[in-house]
Amino acid sequence: MGEEGNVISEPIGSGQILKELWRRIEALEALVGGRGAFLYVPPEMGNVRYAGNLYAHRAGTYYDVYGYRPLTTKAESTSWDGDAKASGETIDLQTVFGLPAGIKAVDVFVIARDETVGVWFGVGPDSSNKFEQVTQVTDGWIGLSAVVPCDGNGDIYFSCSGELDSVYLYIFGYWL
């Protein structure tokens, strides 16, 4: 097995089993003295696929790591294409926008207008933790762009303080 610094560089063939991959990762961890392992996949080998969670280890603590998937065409829904909204609701992103179940966060853009000044709207993982915006001009559009964490099901919550005449919600990407 070839070694280049702290990297084991022998390619992993596509026909080998996951057990061999884990053996090599353990060998890498031993090679770098338990400081963590680095997996190098040459470009000619293709993609790296994983089925579990990714973690980063920093200063003795493990942190969740999520992959961002930008959408080449924003996700839209006929339920959020200028309709009036008057109350809070959970948005099932899988059903309403066609996103995968269990996503961790969304890159969202909401625009709304109302004839009443001072009506607020917000999006977040639940009714108490949300990003908010307030209408400031009669019949003027107001926008909100945010990375919104999802709840445990991969959904977000929309709420408002009164009826909004028109609300659009777009999703430009999401974290898995």
Image (spheres, helix red, strand yellow):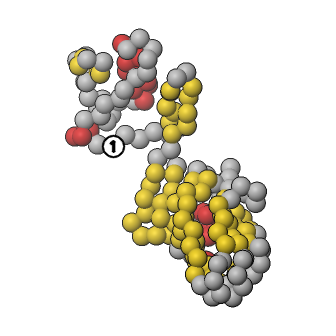
What kind of element bears circle 1? loop
Viewer-side residue, 2 vs 118: 118
Q: Is residue 38 above or below residue 54?
A: above
Question: Which quadrant is home to the N terminus?
Answer: top left
Q: Is residue 147 above or below residue 34?
A: below
Task: Tell me which residue sits at (53%, 74%) in the image.
Answer: 76
Task: Tell me which residue sits at (37%, 18%) in the image.
Answer: 28
Q: Quadrant of residue 44?
A: top left
Q: Total marks drawn?
A: 1
Viewer-side residue, 22 vs 93: 93
In the displayed structure, does residue 161 sit left or right of residue 62?
Answer: right
Q: Position of residue 22 (x, y in %)?
A: 43, 24
Q: Position of residue 104 (x, y in %)?
A: 58, 50
Q: Position of residue 166 (x, y in %)?
A: 64, 84
Q: Where is mark 1, residue-wise? A: 47
In the displayed structure, does residue 117 sit left or right of residue 74?
Answer: right
Q: Is residue 86 above or below residue 38?
A: below
Task: Tell me which residue sits at (37%, 26%) in the image.
Answer: 38
Q: Is residue 59 visible?
A: yes
Report the amino acid beneath label 1: Asn
Viewer-side residue, 166 vs 98: 166
